Amino acid sequence: MRSVEEPASGDTSDLTARARVRDAAIGLFGRNGFGTGVRAIAEDAGVSAGLILHHFGSKEGLRQSCDEHVLRMIREYKKKGVQAGSAEQMLMAMASVEESAPLVGYALRSLQSGGNLAKSFIDHFVADAEEWIADGVAAGTIRPSRDEKARARFVTVQGFGALMLDLALNPPEDPSDFAGMLRGYIDRMGLPTAELYTQGLMTDSSMLDAYLMYADPPGSDGPGPPEQDAGSTDAPGDDKP
Amino acid sequence: MRSVEEPASGDTSDLTARARVRDAAIGLFGRNGFGTGVRAIAEDAGVSAGLILHHFGSKEGLRQSCDEHVLRMIREYKKKGVQAGSAEQMLMAMASVEESAPLVGYALRSLQSGGNLAKSFIDHFVADAEEWIADGVAAGTIRPSRDEKARARFVTVQGFGALMLDLALNPPEDPSDFAGMLRGYIDRMGLPTAELYTQGLMTDSSMLDAYLMYADPPGSDGPGPPEQDAGSTDAPGDDKP
DNA sequence: TAGAATACTGAACATGCGTTCAGTCGAGGA
DNA sequence: TCCTCGACTGAACGCATGTTCAGTATTCTA
């Protein structure tokens, strides 16, 4: 139960104070982190601090509204057509538009903190990855995997994780230039990514063989269907003999 | 300046209140994040809050001392022999020893926040990666790259970034069981990692070709030495000669 | 043994936080 | 016209934080 009405579909009628607060919060959270105080957000939105609590109940409620809004906008953005190849490229496209750039910043911060949005965000891109990987496998451009779901999650987490860490290690001078930092990241990592994805790293399969030998009992053999997933179930139980 | 004496080499004589405070801080920072208050640290160390400020000047000073200590211990740990293959495996080894486990937790938190330790930490492992990659290339087990330095940084950032993000997405029930979470991560990601590193993702080199065509002027050809970085110039020049 | 320096405490201070609340303003309905 | 209700403000509350400080205990030095 929030407090009062909910816009429910962020289409029109969005210059209300409530929406201004939400947008200001997304911008400031993205630029300065979630430690940003409600007073700073209120000032940025041109309202009083009390109004924020009046509308959103608490700072946590505001955070939740921001999460929902960002996720909804990103979904809409993707539905609108652009399937710009990799996830980074899609973020890059969003970050290049002044209007949607703050959403990217907020999403990245959210990934770093690992809230609910982070989970949904990643799940969303994992689903995308499963799709384009399956397409690629069907078309013969991507090699099949022993566990497609795990691989889709892996490349997604790997990609966004590298982006996050690179960001944390090389904080940009201008914390609002998300397009610039994405561009810098792609410049730094583009070549190794392309190399690794096309050639791999090793020259023979001894590493993979060793892993398969170690993970599976030596009775069951090679590349079968993806049996179970190794991904979503957090499974603290180890599976060694 | 700090305040008084500095142990300077954490060998012996390390049960002083100062060391107790430092160890308590490392443990609590690692388990609960850097937002942990000085009073909680003081209580955990069995001293008063004032003493922390007396010894370390400020909370930031304490943080810095922790950074230095953790980095020193990790260096010592690695110097002591074990080159346990991948960085994750080495962390896993450290996290399995009760004594050094808190250091791993602190280091991971530090990576997430991106302080000075994070930079040194990554640089350290990047240097390692350059070494074992060069060895592998020389031995013929690893394919050469067009930019070995970039690749070494890439695989390091990619690996730790994925670990961090996976951690943020699947926070463990017991926030002090770093060995358990590392094991969970390896279980989830081991197979896709092995697959990607041995086979790559794509079946042909069109992706890499496209990247090379895009990044380089069409005059210069093929695999040469790691010339310059590709593309932009904003690059807050960090590690180029 | 006398004195000085240091380790250490406990209370207080200043600040910023999220949140509460009494109350004002303005629009809409009876 | 009155009345109600939601938007909205500004001051205050309670709390936790990092930090300061006067004072006490302890240890070292001469």
Image: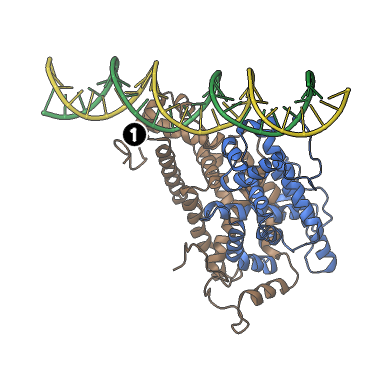
Chain colours: A blue, B brown, C yellow, D green
Place of residue B209 in the rendered image (x, y in percent of width and height, measured from the top left): 68, 75
Place of residue B233 in the rendered image (x, y in percent of width and height, measured from the top left): 53, 68
User: What's the residue at 55%, 52% (across, down)?
Assistant: A175
Q: Quadrant of residue A138?
A: bottom right
Q: Quadrant of residue A84?
A: bottom right
Screen quadrant of the C terminus of chain A: top right
Screen quadrant of the N terminus of chain A: top right
Disc 1, SS? loop
User: What's the residue at 49%, 59% (across, down)?
Assistant: B127
User: What's the residue at 71%, 42% (across, down)?
Assistant: A19
The vertical placement of C24 against B1, above or below, is: above
Of residues B172 and A217, the one drawn nearer to the viewer in this rendering: B172
Place of residue B24 in the rendered image (x, y in percent of width and height, measured from the top left): 46, 31
User: What's the residue at 50%, 40% (across, down)?
Assistant: B103
Tell me the residue that label 1 is attached to. B13
Of residues B141 and A40, the one drawn nearer to the viewer in this rendering: A40
**What type is the residue that disc 1 sits on?**
Ser
